[in-house]
Image: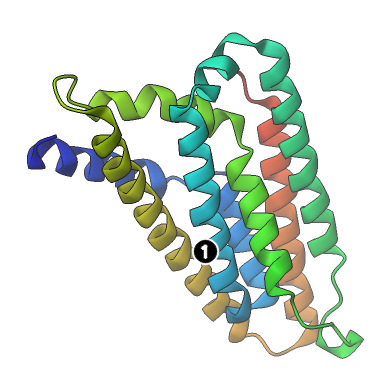
């Protein structure tokens, strides 16, 4: 793989990541409600989730998802239901005056990982996207490692920016009524992402 090809991959990935999908909506929603303490676990969950999704894609699951309507639908509906459940939880989350418990880093990590790793559209997309930048005349595995590492790093940075911006906005709010509004905004975003995931079609 040439440097020019790698830079083209970086540019294409950056453009794709800049468009918020279910994962970023989750990051924004949870960061609005939980503040800065959730940022690092969310970013780690996104990074590991993307690593899982890309590895599964390159291992052949992406092709299987593209061929199997049933498998695609099962994963899609499962992921959609999880997003809706997270949205409802955030909508109903207590605020400071209601003795809100500390946000669990493990829960934030788990939620981000599950939503990212089990997005069937991403898995199917990776199997079509990554080979565009692979040199057929060179060994595949070293190129795959470079591309996966690049994508995961950029995805983590992108998620981190969204998380910190949302957390900064959340931290500037002190009144419980306004914090409740942020929670409900984030919850609505997650429910909307779940509905959109359920409605999406295979490529």
Q: Residue at the right extreme?
A: 98
Residue 102: image quadrant is bottom right
On the image, the x and y values in percent for residue 120 come to 60, 30
Vertical placement of 61 versus 163: above or below?
above
On the image, the x and y values in percent for residue 11 come to 23, 44
Compared across the picture, whether 103 is left or right of 155 comes to: right
* Crowd around label 1: few <14 · some 14–19 · many ≥20 (10 Å): many
Residue at (78, 54) in percent of width and height: 86
Vertical placement of 62 versus 185: above or below?
above
Residue at (46, 37) in percent of width and height: 54
The N terminus, quarter of image = top left
In this view of the protein, which residue sits in the foreground, 141 or 80? Answer: 141
In this view of the protein, which residue sits in the foreground, 83 or 98? Answer: 83
Vertical placement of 154 versus 4: above or below?
below
* Residue at disc 1, secondary structure: helix
On the image, the x and y values in percent for residue 195 come to 73, 36
On the image, the x and y values in percent for residue 87 come to 77, 54
Residue at (41, 53) in percent of width and height: 155
Compared across the picture, whether 143 is left or right of 57 comes to: left
Task: Please name the colour scheme applied to the rendered image.
Answer: rainbow
Residue 141: image quadrant is top left
Compared across the picture, whether 156 is left or right of 138 comes to: right
Q: On the image, numbered disc 1 is attached to which residue?
A: 43
Compared across the picture, whether 164 is left or right of 42 comes to: left
Tell me how many marks there are.
1
Residue at (72, 38) in percent of width and height: 79
């Amino acid at each position: 793989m040439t440097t020019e090809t790698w830079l083209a991959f970086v540019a294409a990935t950056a453009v794709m990541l800049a468009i918020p999908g279910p994962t970023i909506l989750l990051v924004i929603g949870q960061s609005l409600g939980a503040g800065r303490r959730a940022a690092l676990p969310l970013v780690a969950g996104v990074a590991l989730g993307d690593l899982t999704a890309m590895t599964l894609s390159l291992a052949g699951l992406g092709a299987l998802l593209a061929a199997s309507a049933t498998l695609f639908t099962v994963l899609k509906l499962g992921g959609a239901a999880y997003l809706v459940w997270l949205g409802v939880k955030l909508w109903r989350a207590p605020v400071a005056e209601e003795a809100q418990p500390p946000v669990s880093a493990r829960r934030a990590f788990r939620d981000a990982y599950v939503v990212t790793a089990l997005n069937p559209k991403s898995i199917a997309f990776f199997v079509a996207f990554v080979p565009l930048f692979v040199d057929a005349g060179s060994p595949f595995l070293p190129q795959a490692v470079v591309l996966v590492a690049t994508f995961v790093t950029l995805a983590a940075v992108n998620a981190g920016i969204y998380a910190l911006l949302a957390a900064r906005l959340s931290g500037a709010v002190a009144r419980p009524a306004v914090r409740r509004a942020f929670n409900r905004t984030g919850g609505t975003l997650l429910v909307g992402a779940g509905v959109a995931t359920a409605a999406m079609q295979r490529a």
